[in-house]
């Protein structure tokens, strides 16, 4: 279930206390010298970018791509995660188990009946996150510490395994970008990633983050409980918002912000909340078949992840 995992190792833990001893094991090495960092080197190993300083070593990359030879469409299981860490240790000739995790992405690919973009319109707001549909194929939920991304893996990937070719591939990633310890309530090292209890808890977190996203139900005219012209106007306005999609609200608010329409910044959040309430309050009671499918698939991934 892991994809990008970035590591930091203190100098005393790398290669017997001398980080520069890993340099013979890197490819494409370059050297740097500046007043701020002194002498440093960078290179690559198993798909990872490695930066080496006197006081330690950074590794930035995808643990899944490292282990699966450049392919991250396959799910990195708990056992495969252990193998991937051991592989890095062997290649660098240093024990990576105590390397500190400074970023970790939890993700998998879900084959779906329809293209991923067809599902985005049913994914509404999420508390404490900003919803941004960057492209037709990519939907983000952002806050200061983590990010949720949904995208079309079939359109993003360069090489799709034969087993997954000609399928709709819905990718869901939960990215812990900073302050890992405070978010996950643990000092997370490389070997923590494949601890059974930790693995189960982070997969459950992946599921819960999706669960807390508001789900928009089917877009139908609502004619019940209409007794006034104002009620009818509100129902039609809500239907129009549903048809345009949540991303239209985001675009509208961004344009208002760009023009500095309101003097008080709180007005933008109030408008967003108000428009979102209209969508929620004036909708059919029927859940979308697409959202039922996606919710079931994500629940099954979380249930059976090992």
Image: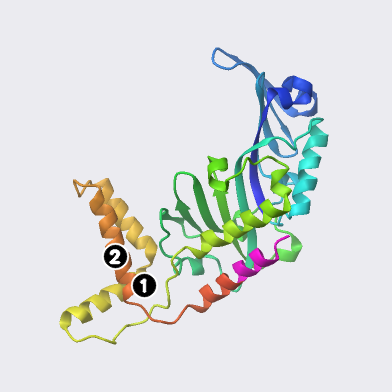
Q: What stretch is highlighted in magenta?
A: 297-306
Q: Is 169 positioned to the left or the right of 14 in the image?
A: left
- Give the numbered dot on residue 293: none
* Label 2 or label 1, whichever comes before in sequence order: 1
Who's the residue at 62% across and 53% down the image?
106
Who's the residue at 35% across and 78% down the image?
283
Rendered-image quadrant of the N terminus = bottom right
In whole angstroms, how far apart are the C-alphas of marks 2 and 1? Answer: 13 Å
Who's the residue at 53% across and 42% down the image?
182
- Give the numbered dot on residue 243: 1
Q: Is 110 placed above or below 145 here?
A: below
Secondary structure state at the residue bearing disc 2: helix
Q: Whole-percent x and y of residue 231?
A: 21, 80
Q: Is 14 placed above or below 38 here?
A: below
Q: Whole-percent x and y of residue 98?
A: 72, 35
User: Local crowd at mark 1 within 10 Å, few (<14), some, or many (≥20)?
Assistant: some
Rendered-image quadrant of the C terminus = bottom right
Residue 275, quarter of the rendered image: bottom left
Residue 252, quarter of the rendered image: bottom left
- Give the numbered dot on residue 275: 2
User: Between 48 and 280, which is closer to the camera in this rendering?
Assistant: 280
């Amino acid at each position: 279930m892991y994809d990008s995992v970035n590591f930091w190792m203190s100098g005393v833990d790398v290669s017997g206390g001398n980080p520069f001893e890993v340099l013979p094991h890197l490819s494409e090495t370059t050297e740097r010298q500046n007043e701020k960092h002194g002498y440093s080197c960078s290179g690559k190993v198993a798909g990872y970018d490695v930066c080496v300083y006197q006081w330690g070593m950074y590794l930035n990359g995808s643990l899944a791509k490292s282990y699966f030879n450049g392919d991250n469409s396959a799910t990195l299981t708990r056992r495969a995660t252990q193998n991937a860490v051991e592989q890095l240790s062997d290649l660098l000739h240093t024990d990576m188990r105590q390397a500190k995790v400074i970023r970790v992405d939890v993700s998998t690919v879900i084959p779906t009946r329809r293209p991923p973009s067809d599902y985005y319109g049913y994914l509404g707001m999420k508390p404490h996150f900003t919803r941004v549909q960057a492209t037709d194929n990519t939907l983000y939920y952002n806050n200061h510490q983590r990010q949720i991304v949904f995208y079309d893996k079939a359109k993003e990937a360069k090489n799709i395994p034969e087993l997954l070719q000609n399928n709709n591939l819905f990718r869901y990633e939960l990215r812990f970008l900073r302050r890992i310890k405070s978010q996950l309530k643990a000092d997370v090292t490389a070997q923590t990633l494949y601890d059974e209890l930790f693995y189960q808890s982070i997969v459950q977190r992946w599921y819960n983050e999706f669960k807390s996203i508001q789900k928009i139900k089917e877009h139908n005219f609502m004619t019940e409980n209409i007794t006034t012209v104002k009620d009818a106007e509100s129902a039609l306005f809500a239907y129009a918002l549903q048809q345009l999609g949540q991303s239209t609200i985001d675009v509208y608010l961004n344009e208002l912000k760009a023009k500095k329409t309101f003097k008080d910044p709180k007005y933008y959040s109030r408008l967003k909340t108000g428009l979102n309430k209209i969508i929620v309050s004036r909708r059919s009671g029927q859940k979308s078949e697409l959202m039922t499918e996606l919710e079931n698939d994500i629940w099954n991934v979380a249930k059976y992840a090992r």
